[in-house]
Image: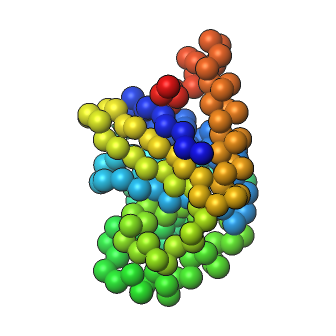
Amino acid sequence: MTLTFESHGPAETRRLGERLARLFRPGDVVLLQGPLGAGKTCLAQGIGRGLRVEERVKSSSFVLVNEYNGRLKVYHADLFRLEDPEEVADLALEENASDGLLLVEWPDRAPDELPPDHLLVRFDVVDATTRHILIEGRGRRYEELMEGLSLTKRDGKTAQTRQTTHARPRD
Ligand SMILES: Nc1ncnc2c1ncn2[C@@H]1O[C@H](COP(=O)(O)OP(=O)(O)O)[C@@H](O)[C@H]1O
Ligand SMILES: [Mg+2]
């Protein structure tokens, strides 16, 4: 199952992250794909906030993986500066993040080193403030997770929550 959202600003993208956060459990893997400035870190911040991580999730400049504590542990990997996919193999991300949620920006830097089952979030930049965000579940666990997301998506359509549910479904 694939769901597409349209976001009109960073606050809406963070809100979508918060909505996703409710659905995660330890061992989950989320790959964040899209060009620089698309909103990957912004969504990660929303997920962090939804999981009650106190610090603000930020882009790491030198470390490949940042660790946060919230309702779940959050491991945030940014592979942008990766030079050799082998480095990712050395990190043993899946194994080391198995007690929490693994978020990976720039997964295309090391596609063969990342778990085949995951939630894929793909960002398209439409204009300065508009992003199309496509979410796809790969593997059984993530198909299930998508069911949960589609339920919250339906909630978002009710007139009352529409004003506060910012990342609006695009359909
Ligand atoms: N709808 C939107 N969603 C997310 N970010 C947006 C949006 N519109 C504009 N922006 C801007 O785009 C940038 C996204 O930055 P960031 O999340 O760090 O991107 P990435 O991690 O993909 O490189 C921020 O400067 C943010 O203010
Ligand atoms: Mg980033």
Q: Quadrant of residue 36?
A: bottom left
The correct choice, above or below, for 101 with respect to 86 in the image is above
Using the image, determine if residue 39 lies above or below residue 164. below
Q: Is residue 44 visible?
A: no
Image quarter where ligand 2 lies: bottom left
**Front-lying residue, 103 or 6:** 6
At a point 61% along the width and 75% down the height, the residue shown is 94
Q: Residue at x 57, y 71 (%)?
A: 115
User: Quadrant location of the N terminus?
Assistant: top right
Residue sticking out furthest to the front: 1
Residue 165 location (% of width, % of height): 57, 25
Q: Nearer the viewer, residue 120 or 130?
A: 120
How many labels, in total?
0
Res. 100 image quadrant: bottom right
Give me the residue at 52% from left, 28% from top. Answer: 169
Q: In the rendered view, would you say 101 is above or below 42?
A: below
Locate residue 85 relative to residue 16 in the image: left or right.
left
Whole-percent x and y of residue 160? Answer: 65, 13
Q: Write down the quadrant of residue 8 in the picture.
A: top left
Scheme of colours in the image: rainbow
